[in-house]
């Protein structure tokens, strides 16, 4: 696949940054799963960073690494465009920028112990803020997947992005419904982790796909 529009950064800058982005995503994913295993119980992703949790440090670093990766990829993906009118109202780059900024805030404003849903008697502004920011970040990432799925001239990346978007939407949606219903929450936690894993792997693959298109001779193909 070749990108014919001008890139945001020269090859000598883009290459190491995209490598760093891919490594950062995978490191963040490893931290999340390491924390999940260390917790030794069924939890949702945000619960790993809740006040007082021994895994809070891993959660914060994981989200920061993912945020940095999303911002790097956003900076290099400015030439990607969706061919669907509704998705073309913005670009994958803007969606990833929103996701990256949201993850930075979500890493610092974590939920309270147990991560209760911010409704009813359990409502706190801290939980509400974390939940809102996390949802915005995850939704923006899903929009970016759909935008890349409808990108011009990149059929293989588009197919992969479409499959990833469908899997993430269905799996995360099912996990969210179980969480809201407070039913089989152990299954809901596993589904959320599965959706998160797919989304982060997609981001790493996108970084690698962009890296492979950076011309070694400094000329855009």
Image (tube, rainbow, N blue to C red):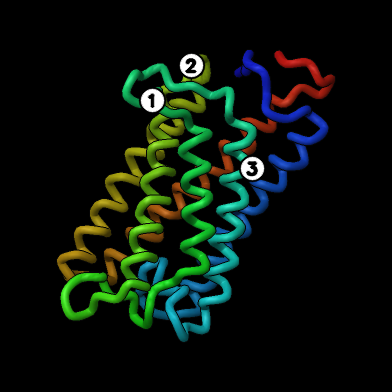
Q: Badge 1 is on which residue?
A: 89
Residue 218 in the image: x percent, y percent?
A: 81, 21
Q: Badge 3 is on which residue?
A: 72
Q: On screen, 211 above or below 153?
A: below
Residue 37 in the image: x percent, y percent?
A: 49, 74
Report the side of 188 relative to 29 (left or right): left
Q: On screen, 200 above or below 42?
A: above
Q: Secondary structure at mark 2?
A: loop
Quarter placement of the N terminus: top right
* Residue pictured at 57% horizontal, 36% vertical: 206
Q: Badge 2 is on which residue?
A: 152
* Residue pictured at 41% horizontal, 43% vertical: 140
Taking depth in this image into account, of 46 and 212 the one nearest to the observer is 46
Please identify, in this view, whether the residue under mark 2 or under mark 3 is nearer the observer: 3
Looking at the image, tell me whether mark 1 or mark 2 is earlier in sequence order. 1
Please identify, in this view, whether the residue under mark 1 or under mark 2 is nearer the observer: 1
Alpha-carbon span between mark 1 and mark 3: 21 Å
Q: Secondary structure at mark 3?
A: helix
Q: Secondary structure at mark 1?
A: helix
Alpha-carbon span between mark 1 and mark 2: 15 Å
Quarter placement of the C terminus: top right
* Residue pictured at 23% horizontal, 54% vertical: 174
* Quarter-of-image position of residue 147: top left
Report the side of 79 relative to 161 (left or right): right
Residue 76 in the image: x percent, y percent?
A: 64, 33
* Quarter-of-image position of residue 125: bottom left
Looking at the image, tell me whether mark 1 or mark 3 is earlier in sequence order. 3
Q: On screen, 112 above or below 59?
A: below
Residue 91 in the image: x percent, y percent?
A: 47, 29
Looking at the image, tell me whether mark 2 or mark 3 is earlier in sequence order. 3
* Residue pictured at 25% horizontal, 59% vertical: 176
Q: How would you rate the neighbour count of disc 1 (Cα within 10 Å): few for under 14, some for 14-19, many for 20 or more?
A: few
């Amino acid at each position: 696949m070749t990108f014919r529009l001008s890139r945001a950064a020269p090859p000598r800058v883009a290459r190491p940054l995209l490598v760093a982005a891919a490594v950062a995503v995978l490191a963040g994913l490893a931290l999340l799963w390491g924390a999940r295993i260390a917790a030794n119980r069924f939890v949702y992703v945000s619960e790993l960073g809740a006040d007082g949790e021994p895994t809070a440090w891993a959660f914060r670093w994981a989200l920061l690494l993912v945020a940095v990766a999303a911002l790097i990829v956003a900076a290099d993906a400015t030439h990607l465009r969706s061919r669907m009118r509704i998705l073309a109202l913005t670009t994958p780059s803007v969606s990833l920028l929103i996701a990256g900024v949201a993850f930075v805030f979500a890493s610092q404003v974590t939920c309270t112990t147990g991560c209760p849903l911010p409704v009813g008697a359990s409502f706190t502004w801290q939980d509400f803020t974390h939940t809102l920011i996390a949802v915005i970040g995850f939704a923006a990432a899903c929009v970016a997947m759909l935008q890349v799925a409808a990108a011009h001239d990149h059929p293989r990346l588009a197919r992969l992005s479409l499959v990833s978007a469908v899997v993430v939407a269905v799996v995360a949606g099912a996990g969210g419904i179980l969480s809201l219903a407070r039913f089989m929450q152990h299954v809901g936690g596993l589904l959320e982790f599965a959706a998160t894993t797919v989304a982060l792997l997609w981001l790493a693959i996108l970084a690698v796909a962009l890296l492979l298109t950076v011309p070694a001779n400094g000329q855009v193909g």
